Image (tube, grey):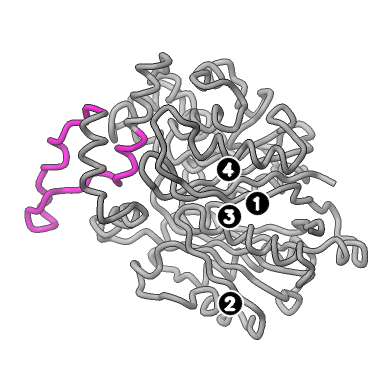
């Protein structure tokens, strides 16, 4: 396999765009990535496009990548459409990496896109439930609520706007995250305040990021005082629904030698994994996959200088600290409390604001993470720039199978 590099990234600000279509968002992100790489649309030889929910939201299926790229005048190239829950665009990046690493093409576009925000709240929240096994979802959710002690009353509130039907207050995944957080509170002494420290860090980092959906710094006390979603999670501890697009330009080493773009970022390793049925005390997907990628990259967690992890909730970031080997199991609360993941800490995590502040337009999230790491490694992160990082990691998981994620992609990027 040949070496592959990222030479340009771009993204829209994540947010709520009722007045914009997907083509508009993709054009903005793609042109920004091409400008960053010093290239034009005609230079793209191959594309992989990640998206999760447009079949449900707009009815557009099968050819989503071709549709948006054609609107930009990009056609007659191989386009692979990738759908893999929250890991859709990071999986698209893995597909493109394989293409270029095998020597099939020299210049490629990895694209992530999603429009999720709509006025129909019921339909909006139902998007996430579609990333579970729908045949057993009701049984699984009842078991989760039983294990977590989650109250049912909130689900039975009536919503006048929906004709008196039961009101959905949150996505099903927030109950899953709340259960995990409560388990860690019982087993390891994780506290709600430590969860609030994660969210406060991320909301503050987001305030420094012009691409973040939320750009307001928050204190720990403000996070704790916010409305509850599912105990122990308050609203700032949970990722919002939004829209957006993110793009990255990949190139081969041969192209790099011929043209020599400034500040190339090497893809040291990228690994895709899927969930499985396992015992509660067996290593989960994040642990298994991180071990594989460290072995392939010839690195360890001690070599990572900056990371973007899938903090769909503050609890998810705590678990990622442990799964990625940044600390031991059960030590995630102590890791945040000691300030290790702050911008000035020993291993800054979610410098972008993470999903909690930057937002989580599902199909765009993975490439959005890569964009942040590229900016950090190139010294282009402005007010949130950390001190001279060399190795960065992205961890992007999504969907649910049993008691773990259905899919996950981890990538390790290196400043050349």
Q: Which residue is mark 3?
A: 90
Closest to the observer, 297 or 48: 297
**Magenta segment: does it hold 164?**
yes
Identify the residue at the far right of this view. Answer: 258
Check the picture and name the quadrant holding the N terminus.
bottom right
The reply to whether dot 3 and dot 2 touch (C-beta < 8 Å) is no
State the separation of the CA atoms marked 3 and 4. Answer: 9 Å
Q: Earlier in the sequence, mark 4 or mark 2?
A: 2
Q: Residue 117's spot in the image, x, y percent? A: 36, 59
Q: Which secondary structure, mark 3?
A: helix
State the separation of the CA atoms marked 3 and 2. Answer: 18 Å
Single out the mark in the foreground, 4 or 2: 4
**Would residue 267 appear left or right of 180 to someone viewing this image?**
right
Q: Which secondary structure, mark 1?
A: helix
Single out the mark in the foreground, 3 or 1: 3
Residue at the image point whose x is 78% and y is 44% from the top: 414
290 vs 80: above or below: above
State the separation of the CA atoms marked 1 and 4. Answer: 13 Å
């Amino acid at each position: 396999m040949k070496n592959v590099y990222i030479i340009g990234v771009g993204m829209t600000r994540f947010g709520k765009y009722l007045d914009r279509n997907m083509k508009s968002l993709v054009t903005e992100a793609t042109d920004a990535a091409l400008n960053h790489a010093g290239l034009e649309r005609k230079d793209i030889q191959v594309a992989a496009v990640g998206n999760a929910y447009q079949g449900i939201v707009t009815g557009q299926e099968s050819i989503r990548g071709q549709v948006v790229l054609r609107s930009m005048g990009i056609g007659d190239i191989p386009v692979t459409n990738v759908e893999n829950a929250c890991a859709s665009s990071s999986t698209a990046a893995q597909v493109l990496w394989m293409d270029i690493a095998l020597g099939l093409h020299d210049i490629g576009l990895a694209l992530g896109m999603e429009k999720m925000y709509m006025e129909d709240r019921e339909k909006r929240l139902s998007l996430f439930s579609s990333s579970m096994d729908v045949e057993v979802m009701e049984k699984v959710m009842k078991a989760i609520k039983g294990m977590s002690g989650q109250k049912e009353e909130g689900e039975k509130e009536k919503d006048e706007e929906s004709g008196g039907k039961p009101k959905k207050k949150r996505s099903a995944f927030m109950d899953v995250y709340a259960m995990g957080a409560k388990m860690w509170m019982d087993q390891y002494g994780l506290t709600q305040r430590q969860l609030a420290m994660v969210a406060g860090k991320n909301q503050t980092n987001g305030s420094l990021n012009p691409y973040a959906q939320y750009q307001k710094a928050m204190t720990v006390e403000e996070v704790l005082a916010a409305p509850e979603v599912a105990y122990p999670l308050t609203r700032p501890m949970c990722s919002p629904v939004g829209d957006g697009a993110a793009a990255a330009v990949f190139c081969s080493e041969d192209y790099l030698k011929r043209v020599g773009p400034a500040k190339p970022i090497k893809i040291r390793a990228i690994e895709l994994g899927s969930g499985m049925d396992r015992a509660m005390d067996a290593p989960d997907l994040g642990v298994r996959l991180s071990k594989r990628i460290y072995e392939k990259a010839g690195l360890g967690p001690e070599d990572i200088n900056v990371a973007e992890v899938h903090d769909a909730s503050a609890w998810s970031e705590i678990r990622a600290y442990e799964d990625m080997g940044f600390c031991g199991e059960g030590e995630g609360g102590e890791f945040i409390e000691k300030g290790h993941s702050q911008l000035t800490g020993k291993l800054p995590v979610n410098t972008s604001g993470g999903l909690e502040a930057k937002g989580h337009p599902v199909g765009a999230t993975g490439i959005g993470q890569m964009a942040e790491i590229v900016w950090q490694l190139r010294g282009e992160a402005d007010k949130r720039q950390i001190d001279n990082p060399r190795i960065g990691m992205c961890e992007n998981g999504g969907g649910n199978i049993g008691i773990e994620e259905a899919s996950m992609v981890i990538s390790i990027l290196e400043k050349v």
